[in-house]
Image: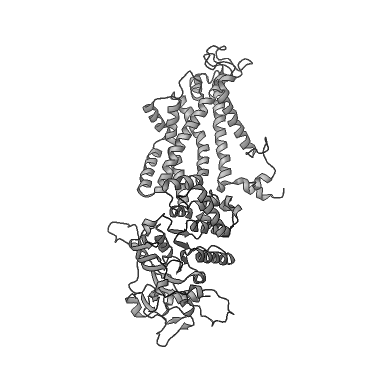
Amino acid sequence: MTDDRTLVTTPADEPDVVLDVRDAVRHYALRRRSLRDPRRSVHAVDGVSVQLRSGRTLGIVGESGCGKSTLGRLITGLETPTAGTIRVGTNGTPAAAAFGSGTVQAVFQDPASALDPRMTVRESIGEALGKVGRDERERRTDEAIAAVGLTPDLGSRYPHELSGGQQQRVCIARAIVDEPELILLDEAVSSLDASLQAQILDLLQRLQRNTGTAYVFISHDLRAVRQVSHSVAVMYLGQVVEQAPAEAFDRGLLHPYAVALRSTEPRILDDGAEPIERIVLRGEPPSAVALPPGCRFAPRCPIVEDHCRRIAPDLVEAASGHLVRCHKPGDLTLSGIGRAGAGTPAEA
Amino acid sequence: MPTIAERLPSHGVRLIRRWPVRGIVANIAVSLILLYIVLAVLGPYITPFAPNQVGAGPRLSPPSGDHWFGTDALGRDQLSRVVTAARPALLSAVYAVTFAFAIGTVIGISAGFLGGLWDGGLSRVVDLLFAIPEYLLAILVIAVMGSGLVNASLAIGIACIPRFARIARGSTLAIMERDFIDAARLCGRGGVWIMRRHILPNIASPLVIMTAINMSTAEGAYAALSFLGFGIRPPEADYGSMISSSQQYLLTDPWVVAFPSIAFVTLVLAFNLIGDVMRDHLDPRSRRGVSRFSASPTE
């Protein structure tokens, strides 16, 4: 199951880097009530660094408002970062310069909103082909429609005549038709029901094997992310708290937030694995405007210590390719609070 | 594409197999508009007398076999004048609304699409235009440009710009929230393409409704300006000026005022009804017909 997702470690085999995000920051300034008020801003994305190679998938998980969608918009160039650099494509063009060049494409969560109701399927897909002649546009549109498993007669339909799954296939066809190097999948399967999700994920993986396109897969659904991703970044309040190769999900995650996320994922009981205690996080994440001085997860962390509330941890490499931002990585595991001397679990 | 409504028996008069209008009121309104259009086109060829022929009959004669609508103070045939006046009436409404639609839609879509300072600037200009009373604004424009059919229509059109601009901007803002705008940008499509191919088709429904409603407003405004003497130059027939020049006979010979008034009110009413019908058809929020059909699906 993990064979084709295992990272190739030989440097000679490494495919090109198609996404290089370094210390990306995106703040949104808040309106001040008076001129004497301090300037405040929402820290939507606060110093994220990720890399992605051609043909691979980077999963980004986190709860609502953690900045994962903003990170996605930064990658596509729809938003510009407040600080930091984002380079896309094999030649490392800044995302803002590559915007609209067809290097990066996106599939959004709600296919009904992502398709113009007044455009036919063919027109929507052909929109991604800007500078080509009519004949080539028709041919490549046909290819894309076939590639996503739609029948050619759907080409002249309007979006409201299609099912949700078909609509999402059209969105995928539009994303792949101009052969981008990177596709952003922002909650691309979240609005579909379970069997359709599986079909679309299958389709995405097959397309990736055929074309070698890199995916950034943003979702709050850990299972979907783990199914398609080669590596996964867990985000909390604008920061990456844990970044690991996909197989680390099966070995074990280190950050208490990531562990809590995994423990709440629904599972069929009789699958042979040891029973998992659900870790329910109390409270809301702190405001992204007034951030706590220490670890951002401290107010909700089940294994928090005084130290955590004062000093913010850095993102450090706990194992090869496995980064974690925690003072006590691995102290909270899926079977509860592991390891001796973990301290008393504090309730907020 | 057959809709549920098409498969169900029609409630209205069905003139031809694919007659697009359903409902008695809608059919009456459409028929009236068609009648006025026919009169406007054929007017000069079908009138019993030349509309400006003084002394075609006795002065101020009541309706009779010779003069169905009577004659006015100069002995001109009222029926001929009422029929002839359909052309300036329709033209003024079409000129005014076309102008307001073109300018207002461009302003509204640009403001909604560009946002920021552009939106602020354009919206303030529209607010300014909106703040001036419409007739005052129209008379101001006429004072600068002079009277006449085209100038009066343009004046009305300018006064109607804010309505189109506002509805276009509001609808554009709603469309801008949709993901397909971002998708089009990612595909490298520029602002003009997005505004023309994505925004305009998607805000067409409210704009078409606005057009129909404004036809009646513009027609009313033109009659008012014509009544005040800013319309088409006398002696050409025009509802407003006909009413205005005959008002002194209102008590003694009421038909002189009555026939142009009835013709004018009927036209405005027909425009209004068309507007209502279009809104019911195009605006899903007030689609009364749907609930009526779905209430008795088997009948």
Q: Answer left or right for B287 relative to A233.
A: right
State how many labels appear.
Answer: 0
Closer-to-camera residue (B274/B247): B274
> Is residue B152 shown to the viewer in this render?
yes
The x and y percentages for residue B82 are 55, 22
Closer-to-camera residue (B235/A203): A203
The x and y percentages for residue A266 are 54, 74
Q: How is the image coloured?
A: one colour
> Is residue A264 shown to the viewer in this render?
no
Q: Give the quarter of the figure containing the C terminus of chain A.
A: bottom left
Which residue appears at 47% of the width and 82% of the height? A336
Closer-to-camera residue (A132/B159): A132
Q: Answer left or right for A321 relative to A137.
A: left
Residue B208 to residue B95: above or below: below
The x and y percentages for residue B79 are 58, 20
The x and y percentages for residue B292 are 65, 47
Residue A308 to residue A105: above or below: below
Which residue appears at 51% of the width and 24% of the height? B239
**Extreme-right residue of the structure:** B299
**Extreme-front residue of the structure:** A12
Residue B211 to residue A185: above or below: above
Location of residue B65 (image quadrant): top right
**Extreme-bottom residue of the structure:** A340
